[in-house]
Image (cartoon, grey):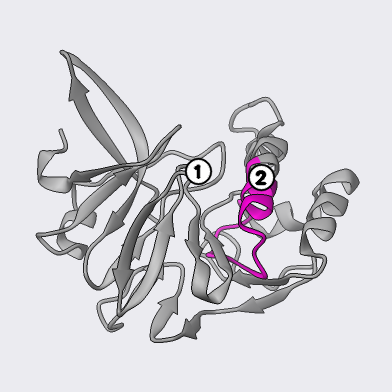
Amino acid sequence: MNYFKFSISENELLALPSGALWWPDQSILCVSDLHFGKSNRLARKGQSWMPPYENQDTLLRLEKDLDATNTKKIICLGDSFDDNEASRSLPPDEVLWITKMQTRREWIWISGNHDPSPKNLGGTFLESLEIEKLNFQHIASSKKRFEISGHYHPKIRVRVKHQSFTKRCFLVDDKRVIMPAYGTYTGGLYCNRDPLRSIMNQNSIALMTGKEIYPIPISKAN
């Protein structure tokens, strides 16, 4: 399994190319910003039409990460659904898919700004969670000493051989991790722009996701 290993508050964490975070000592897999039902929400509000296959694609990748890590606990770090209605309008086969993945696992839904209300898909709903001095919450907070958060959908643009390309990324410093969006239909905020630039320490790095994961100093991002 390809990964990038780093530590926060003496806890060893592994960033995976998929955008998931694996904590081996606790058997915890963490993902953020799944945004299930985005195409459904856009269609309901008459804003746009997108092929309604993002849920299946996201679930396939999540299932693969769950199988690869054999995790005992999963933390979905907020905005798991694009709005509260999306959690109630998933097709039956996708509800069954999620239910099967929850079998013999502790499943925790963290509240996000898109989906603040309790879920109806099993598992436990929490505003935030602290484990071994690490705080799991949707949006970064300067009040927390060590934290894992999401919300901003960080991405990085790099230039190679006169070509530039953009990828989702983790942002990591000695106090926090900001997770990339895991969902298929999600945009992003460039990691070297505010507010991310002011949230992260000067020595922070971006971990670019894709087929493999690459560490890049944020100062070298385009």
Q: Cβ–Cβ below 8 Å for labels 2 and 1?
A: yes
In-image side of 187 versus 6 (left or right): right
Query: Mark 2 or 1 closer to N-term?
Result: 1
Element type at mark 2 = helix
Q: Quadrant of residue 195?
A: bottom left
Q: Say which amino acid is labelled 2.
A: Lys
Q: Say which amino acid is labelled 1.
A: Ser
Give me the disc on residue 195: none
Residue 124 x %, y %: 70, 77
Give me the disc on residue 64: 2
Q: Please say if 26 is above or below 219.
A: below
Which residue bears the numbered disc 1?
Answer: 18
Find out whether residue 78 is within the magenta segment. Answer: yes
Tag 1: Cα neighbours inside 10 Å, few (<14), some, or many (≥20)?
many
Q: Please say if 157 is above or below 112.
A: above
Q: Which residues are magenta?
A: 61-82
Q: Please say if 140 is above or below 101.
A: below
Element type at mark 1 = loop
